[in-house]
Amino acid sequence: MKQQVEWNIKANIAKLMPNEDTQYNWPSLCNLIEKLKPESGKADVGGIIRDEDGNCIMAYAMSIDCDSHNMAEALAAEFGGKWCNQLGFTNFVLELDSNIIVNMVNQEGNKNRKLKMVADRVTRWVQEANATAQHYYREGNQVADALAKIASISGTRMIYQSFEQLPKEAKGPFMMDKWQMPSIRTKNY
C-alpha cells in the first residue's frame, strides 16, 4: 500500500508541474519469482520497469540458474538494476518481494556469503543511481507475476520494450496497475 501511495504522489506531482524541473525521475523496477525448481537449479522470474506515469519502459521474463528463492530475487534485481543503471536512470525504486534481499541491499546485514556477493553488486548500482530498495508484496505487482509465469511456460528469455510488446497475459494487469485499480491475485488449480 505504501508503494502505491508513493507512486500516486509522484505521478500527481509530475502531472501538476509538467514544465518544472522537479528532479523527480522515478522509474520503478519490480521483480518477482514465480517458480523455483530446485531439482533443475532454475527459477523463473519476471520484472517490469515503469516511468513516473506508470508507462512500461521495459519488461522481462526469463529462467535463471539459482538454488534458492532469495538468490533468484537477488539475480533478478541485479539484472533490472544493471539495466536501469546502464541507461542512466536515477532515483528509481527497486521493489522486491524478498525482505532479506531488501535488507542486504540497504546494508542492514545478512551473513549468507553467496547472497552477499550478488547483493553487494546490486547495492553498488543502487547507490550509484541514488535509488532505493523497498519490500513489495508479491500480490502488489500482477504484471511481474504474469511475466514470471510466461518465463515458466516458454523457458526462454524475453525482453519487452513497450506496452504493445507485452504478452496478453500481462496487458490486463498492467492496465489495472496504471489505472490504479486494485486487483486480486488468483490461483488456478
Image (cartoon, grey):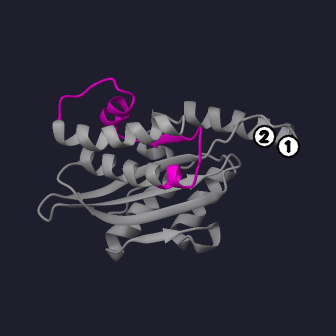
Q: Quadrant of residue 79?
A: bottom left
Q: Which residue is mark 1?
A: 18
Residue 1 appears in the rendering: no
In the rendered image, residue 161, in percent from the top left (x then y), is placed at 58, 68
Name the residue type under label 1: Pro
Magenta span of residues: 83-112
Q: CA distance from mark 2 to mark 1?
A: 6 Å
In the rendered image, residue 48, in percent from the top left (x then y), is placed at 52, 56
Q: Which residue is at the front of the view, 173 or 28?
A: 28
Q: Quadrant of residue 42?
A: bottom left
Q: Which residue is at the front of the view, 176 or 23?
A: 23
In the rendered image, residue 113, in percent from the top left (x then y), is placed at 17, 37
Q: Is residue 109 magenta?
A: yes
* Location of residue 36 with respect to 1 vertically, above or below: below
Residue at (46, 38) in percent of width and height: 126
Residue 119 appears in the rendering: yes
Label 2 neighbour load within 10 Å: few <14, some 14-19, many 20+: some
Q: Are marks 2 and 1 in contact (CB under 8 Å)?
A: yes
SS under mark 1: loop
Label 1 neighbour load within 10 Å: few <14, some 14-19, many 20+: few
Q: Which residue is mark 2?
A: 14
Residue at (53, 40) in percent of width and height: 129
